[in-house]
Structures are given as C-alpha cells and as structure tokens.
Image (cartoon, helix red, strand yellow):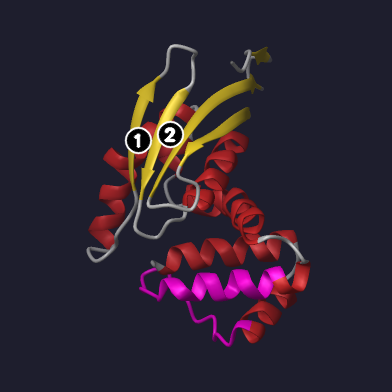
Amino acid sequence: MKGVIFNAVEDAVTTLYSADTWDDLLDEAGLTGDYTSLGSYDDGDLFLLVGAACKATGHQPEALIRTLGEYAFPHLASRYPELVDGASTFEFLRAVNDIIHPEVLKLHPDAKPPEFEFEDRPDGALRMTYTSARKLGVLAEGLIHGAGSQFGETLDIEVVSGSGEEVTVFDIRVVEAAATGTTEQAA
C-alpha cells in the first residue's frame, strides 16, 4: 500500500483525535509510523493500526475504516486540487480511473490502485463497482462519503453486494446538493 494512504489515515486520526492518539496507535500496533508518501508499505500495517484503534475505541473495524476513509478524503483531494475544484461527486468518481490513478501510477509505478466501473441506473443512482485484491470496499465507501462532503452533497450509499470481498458493488444517490439546495428522492 502506498504511503500516501497511511499519510491520509494519520491526518484523519489527528483530525478526529490528536497527534498523541496517532502515536499511541503506532505503539500499540508495534509500528514506527515512518510513512513517506512515495514509499510502499505492507497492507498489514493498516490492519494493525485498525486493530489498535478498535481496541482503544471499541468501534467495529468496518465502521472505523469507513470513518477513516471519510476523514482522509480531504488529504487525498489536496493532492489533486484541479479535480475537486467545482466538480460534483459523480464527476469526481468517474475521473478516478482515467485521471487520478494514471497520475498515481506515474509517481508510483508499483502501485496497485483499485479499479472502478460505473453504470447509470434508471432510478438515478450511479452504480459503482470496486475491484481490489485488498478487499477495502468499506474504505472506498468512506472516501465516497468524504467526496460528497467535499462537494457539498449528501449521499445515500447502498452496498448492493460484496462487502469485504474483492468486488464490492455500490448504488450511490445524491440526496441533497448544498449548492442548489436541491433534494432528490432516494429510490
């Protein structure tokens, strides 16, 4: 896993709690925390950190990972400000495969970013299929919520299938868009 993900998680933990909490989690997990954005690290480090955080907070792993994803989004978005300036959540999501991941691969040729497929549903939902050997669809769900917040949109995200699997399918609906004050019905 790329260090930028660990940097985003650190930012989320320090935003939600404190720098001392991040240090405590590293100690509990037996990790040094020397994550550079350009480095590659064992995926297991993330799960060790999540385990330490669950022990400290009493939260369930999926809920914690989802929350970390949501609060990590601003850190990741700051790396590509041109993609989040004036866009909508759906526009941003559709750009990940074609714009963001190619840029990631230029900087990190050994990276293995997830792949996304999209389908517009008759009920107005955007169906997004997440595929990754890391099985972190719940992190993707949190990041999607973070994107919604970034763009001033309240989202309804339904996990259609595959929670915790290599392939997770989501139906995403914009329930409310802050810019227009528009409220849409979730089907």
| Quarter where residue 147 is shown | top right
User: Which one is nearer the viewer's eye here, 8 or 135?
Assistant: 135
On the question of residue 35 being in view, the answer is yes
Q: What stretch is highlighted in magenta?
A: 29-54
User: Which one is nearer the viewer's eye here, 9 or 55?
Assistant: 55
Q: Is residue 35 magenta?
A: yes
Q: Which amino acid does label 1 sit on?
A: Ala
Q: What element carries label 2?
A: helix
Which quadrant does the C terminus fall into? Answer: top right
Tags 2 and 1 touching, CB below 8 Å: yes
109 sits to left or right of 67:
left
Q: What element carries label 1?
A: helix
Taking 140 as reference, is 9 above or below it?
Answer: below
Instruction: Give coordinates of residue 12: x percent, y percent.
Output: 63, 60
Q: How crowded is mark 1: few (under 14 residues within 10 Å), some or many (20 or more)?
A: some
Q: Is residue 55 magenta?
A: no
Instruction: Identify the residue shown where x is 39% and y is 60%.
Output: 134
Instruction: Identify the residue shown where x is 23% and y is 57%.
Output: 106
Q: Mark 1 points at which residue?
A: 95
Instruction: Identify the residue shown where x is 29% and y is 62%.
Output: 111
Taking 181 as reference, is 172 above or below it?
Answer: below
Q: What residue type is labelled 2?
A: Phe
Instruction: Give coordinates of residue 159: x percent, y percent.
Output: 53, 37
On the question of residue 151 being in view, the answer is no
User: Which one is nearer the viewer's eye here, 98 or 130?
Assistant: 130
Which quadrant does the N terminus fall into? Answer: bottom left
